[in-house]
Image (spheres, helix red, strand yellow):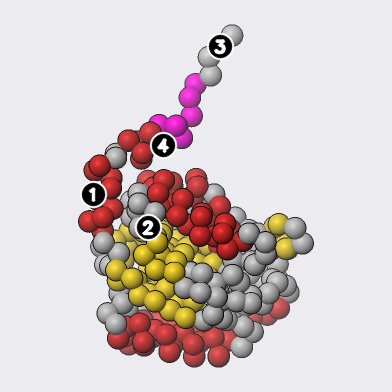
Amino acid sequence: MKVALAQVGSGCDKSANLARITEVTAAASGTGAQLVLFPEFAMYEKPVVDATFARAAEPITGHFATAVAALAAEHGVSIAAGVVEQNRDDPLKPFNTLAVWNHQGNLVGRHRKALLFDVGSFAESRYITAGDPDEPATVVLDGTVVGLQTCYELRFPELSRAQVSAGATVLAVLSSWVPGPHKTQQWTTLARARAIENLCHVCAVTQSAPVSTGHSLAVAPDGDVLAELGTAPDWVCVELDQAHTERARQLDPSILATREALARPRPREST
C-alpha cells in the first residue's frame, strides 16, 4: 500500500483548510498514493481547544466532509482526515473524529477520539465529547486492515494491541501533537515503539508547527523510519511492504502470542 503523509497547517478558516487538502490530495494521487492521511483537526484547528470548536462543528455528512468525499472519488484515493463532528446530544461538546472515505468517496470508517488530552492546562474534555474506548476502530482499505488512532491515544499501548488483535497491520495515528519540551522525541519514540511491539507499520501524521510539533513519520515493523518530515507544511509518499510485516511476524511470533497471554486476566488464588 502506498500512503501519503500530509502534514498540513490547519487554522480557523475551513475553506482554506479544504483548499490545502484539495491541493495535497491531487498531488499525492499523481504519485500513485492509495491512501492520503491528514492530521487531527484538519477541518478546524487552534493552538488550544475552546468553545469555538462547537461553532465550527458539522455533521459527518456536512459540507466539509462531503467535499472531502468528492475529492476521494475524483482522484480515486482513500482519504482519512480529522473533523469536528457535531454532537446532537450535546451541541456544545462535539466529537473529535477521524473520518475515512474510500476511493469511491464512500464513508467507510469513523473513530471518535476516546482518550482526550487533559494534561496540564490543556483540558480537551471540557469542550469535546469522548468516543467509545472499547471500540477497536479499524477499517479495511484495499485489503489492508488499518487501525485509527488520534494523537494522545498513541501513548496507550493497549489501544494498538486491540487494533492489531482485530487484524490491523497498519496503525494510522492522526494527530495535532502539542509542542513542548521533549515532545518531538516522545512522538517519534512512541510511534517506533508501537511498530516494534506490534510488528506492524505505523503512519503518524501531525499538524505542522507552530500549532504542533511536525515531524510526521512512517515506521516499519522493525522500527526503521521509512520517512520523516520536518516542522513545516509538507507531504511525502511511502510504500508500505506488507510482506515485511508477514516476515517479521513469522520470524518472531512469540511477541504477539506472549503479549496476548499477558493481557488475559488470570484467576486469583484463594488464600
Foreground: disc 1 or disc 3: 1
Where residue 33 appears, as percent x and y from the top left, is: 31, 77
Which mark lies nearer to you, 2 or 4?
A: 2
In the rendering, which numbered label is found on residue 21?
Answer: none
Please name the residue shown 43% across and 79% down the image.
235
* Residue type (three-letter) at the residue carrying disc 1: Arg
Answer with the quarter of the image where residue 122 lies.
bottom right
Question: Residue at label 3?
Answer: 270
Query: Toward the viewer: 69 or 115?
Result: 115
Q: Which mark is residue 247?
A: 1
Residue drawn at x 49%, y 76% as measured from the top left: 7
Range of magenta residues: 259-267
Tell me which residue sits at (73%, 74%) in the image.
51
Quadrant showing the C terminus: top right
Identify residue type, mark 4. Arg
In the image, 157: left or right of 152?
left
Where is residue 28 drawn, in percent x and y?
35, 82
Which residue matches tag 4?
259
Tell me the distance, in whole angstroms, between the alpha carbons under discs 3 and 2: 46 Å
- Relative to 249, does residue 8 appear above or below in the rendering? below
Label 2 residue SS: loop
